[in-house]
Image: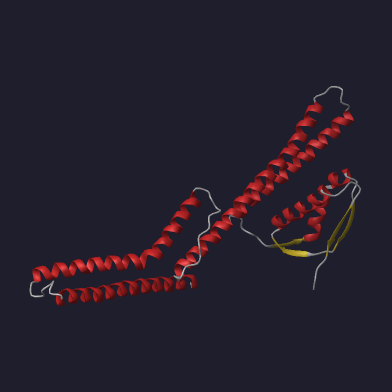
Amino acid sequence: MRNKIASARRSIRIAAIFSALVFLILALTMIITVTVTMFLYRRDILRLQRLEVTIPVYAGISVIVGTIMSRFAGKRPIGRIIEINEATKEVARGNFDVVVDEDIQATELREMAHSFNIMTRELAAKKLLHTDFIENVSHEFRTPLSAIEGYAILLRRKSVSDEMRVEYAKKILNNTQRLTALTGNILLLSRLEPGELILEKKPFSLDEQLREIILMLESEWTAKDLELDIELESITYSGSRELLYHVWHNLLTNAVKFSNKGGKIIIRLSSFP
């Protein structure tokens, strides 16, 4: 409601400014036309009695003066509008580095230029984020896929013992679960971006959710011989279980991934008054 009122006020203000500008141009045109007409009359160049000559001359002077006044009065704002229009075309071509000058006296045009620059900065940041996201996702997918392919090739060898076959199958399963988690994250992001994800806030045990994720990653942190120092207070939280699951899973996965072999991970959960 407030946005509609502000928009209506802005429209009225713009209409008032343009009306005042038109009135000023007409008033100056009339003054200059009358002045020129009187000058021609006093010089005995124009006779007011001859209407067939006076009226066309008067109209011609008015048109010329009005055109010149409109040209000078509208040159700067029209130039700014053309500049913003050309910048918009650059954005449509995919160039998000374009910037328009915000040093404009007209408030509405200045706000338009400012909003345009904010838009281009956000689009450039979003483009960079998408590029980094694609590169990171490609790398994250390539690693488990290469591991699955390698272990699958090893499983085809007849000389592999049963013990090693079980180990290779376990490795393939772990990497498959990793791909499943990555796919879930991508699907979640695709739903979050357009606002399609409906958040359902329900009470659930936060400490149990963390324990579940820690146990699911057991094969990864035991493989690196990591020590886990865990203290989880019993907490019931009301929120989106799905979103928080992805948050904890990503945090713990990165903690295990970037910890040195034989290192230590400290996990604490407590409530604040």
Tell me if residue 193 can be seen. Answer: no
Q: Residue 258: give x, y in percent of width and height.
A: 82, 49
Question: Is 114 in front, or is 241?
Answer: 114
Residue 13 coordinates in the image, percent (x, y): 40, 74
At 22% from the left edge and 76% from the top edge, which residue is drawn?
35
Q: Position of residue 254 (x, y in %)?
A: 79, 50
Q: In the rendered view, does 115 fall on the left or right side of 145? A: left
Identify the image quadrant of residue 51: bottom left
In the figure, is residue 142 to the left or right of 157? Answer: left
Residue at position x 27%, y 76% from top?
27
Q: Residue at x 41, y 58 (%)?
A: 82
Q: How is the image coloured?
A: secondary structure
Residue sitting at 88 percent across and 45 percent down?
224
Q: Seen in the image, is 65 located left or right of residue 259?
A: left
Q: Is residue 226 above or below residue 160?
A: below
Residue 205: name its quadrant: bottom right
Task: Look at the picture and state if 262 lies above or below 28.
Answer: above
Q: Is residue 188 visible?
A: yes
Number of numbered labels in the structure image: 0
**Horizontal relation, residue 65 to residue 175: left or right:** left
For the residue pair 34 and 180, the one nearer the viewer reads as 34
Query: Which residue is most to the top?
Result: 158
Percent coordinates x, y for residue 208 in the rendering? 81, 57
The front one of 47 and 243 is: 47
Taking depth in this image into account, of 37 and 149 the one nearest to the observer is: 37
Question: Is 158 located above or below residue 221 in the figure?
Answer: above
Quadrant that contains the C terminus? bottom right
